[in-house]
Each structure stands twice: as structure tokens, then as C-alpha cells.
Image (cartoon, rainbow, N blue to C red):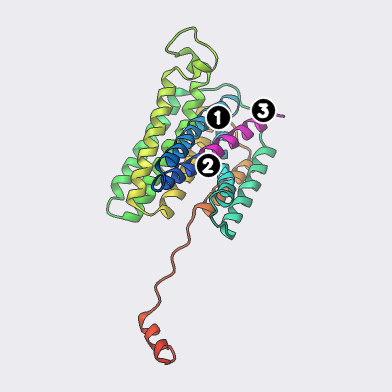
């Protein structure tokens, strides 16, 4: 099996565990209202799953390109859709099936045209400038959107996704030679060195900040606006970062795969608009037997 394909499979596993664990956390909170001990156990196990997913994704970026791992971020919804249908008993309609098929086609394109992992280029200064530019951009957009609740929800959701998209990039740095050289305990090698350096603290802080901003976005506006904006940034930010900050390449066909993944994510996460309430006058006329105009 090629290193690129191995990276894709590990990334798919990591994002699947992440999304399924997040759904199980919500299930645990729901059970907690009826049975506290059972709900607490389910929530605790799901939280352990989210922690494990971070380590799996860390391993994925350590063996492959961060741009490829970032593009795979939407594939976890495949497992989440199946989990929602088979375990949670939630309905899966045409929209979800379309999204699953789009993501499957996208993953095929990404895998078919994935080359060997790029050479070990880590441009930390460029990564920090990239992070600062994105933070400044979204801060300005946030200030400009304060008078428009719809635009504000999209902006804050996108900001949360952008911060989350930097996690894989700082994980890549922490697992690289740069991370080993800045380890808090000189001489410590192997996986422990990847967890004991300043860049590890950076991606942990970014993870927590992204979660807090996302919660604020949910309080600001409807999920139909927040989730797609979050997902688009969560996927595209590491892809661009892999190219500009790690010297990676992305085949034109893989750009098409990235577009299909985004389309699939939007198809799965988008919620249909509620039907408008029936016209009261028409109902009264129907009750009297009069024809509606």
C-alpha cells in the first residue's frame, strides 16, 4: 500500500472516529436526562473517542501531506451518516445519500491522483503569518457583520472552521524535525517528542478555541448557516496551508475532489427550510366549503 493511500485511510479513520464520537456525546447528554449513570458512561466513552481521533489524525499528518489529510476532513460524514441511520435510527433521505456518493467519488479522485508525500518542508514563519492573516481577516469580517445576524453567523462559523483547520498544520510541525528540535526535554525521541513541544500546545489551544468559537456561532445563528461555513473552512484552510507552508502539491483532479467533498458536506449538513404555515383565510374558506381563490 502506498504511503499516500495509507495516509488517506488513517485520516478517514480519524475523522470518522471524531464525527461519530461527537454524535455519541450528544446521545449521552440525551440519555443523561433519563438515566444519569448510563448517560455519563456514554458521554465519557464518546469523549475518549474524540481524544483518540486527535491522536489518529496526528499520526496521519506525520506520515503524509497535511493538504491530503485536510481534504479528507469531510469524509468522516460517511461514517456519521451510517451511524445515524443504523445506531441512532435517524432517517437518511435523498440529500444525505447524494452527499455520501459525492464524498465517495471525491475520495476516489484524491486517492487515484495522490503522489508520494512531499519532502519534509516546514516553513514555520510562513505558517504563523498565514494564521495571523486569517485571524485578522475574520476579525474584520466579524466587526463588519455585526449588524446582520445571518452574515454574522456565517462569519463566526467560518472563523471556527478556519481555526480548526490550522490544527492539522500545527500537528504536522509538532511531528516534524522542527518539533523534535524544540522538545521541552532534549533527547526525548519518537512519538513522545511530537507531544512535548510548543507546537503541540499550539494545536491544543487552537482546538479548544475553535470549539468555543463554534459554540458562540451556534448561539448567534441557525445551524443551516453555521455548519456549512465551518466545514468549508475546516477543509480548505489546511489544503491551502499544505501548499503554501509545507511545499506540498495538489493535482488538478484533486482540486475537483476537494470541490466534490465540499459539495457532499453541504448536501449532508444542509437542512431543508421549514414549510410556511398554511394561510389562515384559505383554511377558513375550506372549512366552509367555499373554493379557495
Vertical arrangement, residue 195 with respect to residue 110, above or below: above
Residue annotated with mark 2: 20
Which badge, 1 or 3, is on the more N-terminal residue? 3
Q: Is residue 8 part of the magenta span, yes or no?
A: yes
Q: Is residue 53 part of the magenta span, yes or no?
A: no
Residues at circles 1 and 2 in contact by the CB criterion of under 8 Å: no
Disc number for residue 21? none
**What's the CA distance linking mark 2 and mark 3?**
26 Å
The x and y percentages for residue 145 are 31, 50
Which badge, 1 or 2, is on the more N-terminal residue? 2
On the question of residue 53 being in view, the answer is yes
- The crowd level at tag 2 (other Cα within 10 Å; few <14, some 14-19, many 20+) is many
Residues at circles 2 and 3 in contact by the CB criterion of under 8 Å: no
Residue annotated with mark 3: 3
Front position in the image: 56 or 136:
56
On the question of residue 178 being in view, the answer is no
Vertical arrangement, residue 293 with respect to residue 22, above or below: below
What's drawn in magenta, residue-wise? 1-18
Q: Is residue 143 left or right of residue 1?
A: left
The residue drawn where x is 36% and y is 36% is 135
The x and y percentages for residue 88 are 53, 50
Quadrant housing the C terminus: bottom left
Residue annotated with mark 1: 56
Which of the two discs, 1 and 3, sits closer to the camera?
Answer: 1
- SS at mark 2 in the image: helix
Residue at the far right: name it. Answer: 1
The residue drawn where x is 51% and y is 41% is 19
The residue drawn where x is 37% and y is 47% is 155
Front position in the image: 242 or 198:
198
Which of the two discs, 2 and 3, sits closer to the camera?
Answer: 2
Which badge, 2 or 3, is on the more N-terminal residue? 3
State whether the magenta stretch is mostly helix, strand or loop.
helix
Amino acid at each position: 500500500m502506498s504511503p499516500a493511500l495509507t495516509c488517506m485511510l488513517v485520516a478517514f479513520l480519524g475523522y470518522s472516529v471524531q464525527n461519530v464520537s461527537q454524535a455519541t456525546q450528544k446521545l449521552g447528554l440525551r440519555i443523561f436526562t433519563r438515566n444519569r449513570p448510563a448517560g455519563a458512561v456514554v458521554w465519557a466513552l464518546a469523549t475518549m473517542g474524540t481524544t483518540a481521533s486527535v491522536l489518529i489524525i496526528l499520526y496521519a499528518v506525520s506520515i503524509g501531506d497535511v493538504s491530503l489529510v485536510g481534504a479528507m476532513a469531510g469524509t468522516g460524514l460517511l461514517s456519521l451518516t451510517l451511524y445515524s441511520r443504523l445506531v441512532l435510527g435517524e432517517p437518511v433521505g435523498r440529500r444525505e445519500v447524494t452527499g455520501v456518493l459525492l464524498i465517495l467519488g471525491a475520495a476516489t479522485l484524491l486517492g487515484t491522483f495522490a503522489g508520494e508525500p512531499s519532502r519534509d518542508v516546514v516553513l514555520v514563519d510562513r505558517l504563523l503569518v498565514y494564521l495571523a492573516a486569517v485571524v485578522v481577516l475574520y476579525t474584520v469580517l466579524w466587526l463588519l457583520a455585526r449588524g446582520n445576524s445571518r452574515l454574522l453567523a456565517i462569519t463566526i462559523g467560518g472563523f471556527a472552521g478556519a481555526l480548526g483547520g490550522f490544527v492539522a498544520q500545527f500537528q504536522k510541525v509538532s511531528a516534524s524535525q522542527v518539533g523534535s528540535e524544540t522538545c521541552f526535554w532534549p533527547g526525548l525521541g519518537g512519538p513522545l517528542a511530537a507531544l512535548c513541544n510548543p507546537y503541540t500546545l499550539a494545536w491544543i489551544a487552537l482546538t479548544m478555541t475553535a470549539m468555543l468559537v463554534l459554540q458562540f456561532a451556534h448561539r448567534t445563528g441557525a445551524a443551516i448557516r453555521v455548519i456549512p461555513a465551518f466545514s468549508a473552512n475546516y477543509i480548505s484552510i489546511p489544503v491551502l496551508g499544505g501548499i503554501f507552508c509545507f511545499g506540498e502539491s495538489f493535482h488538478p483532479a484533486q482540486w475537483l475532489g476537494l470541490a466534490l467533498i465540499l459539495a457532499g458536506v453541504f448536501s449532508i449538513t444542509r437542512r431543508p427550510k421549514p414549510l410556511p404555515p398554511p394561510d389562515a383565510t384559505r383554511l377558513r374558506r375550506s372549512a366552509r366549503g367555499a373554493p379557495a381563490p
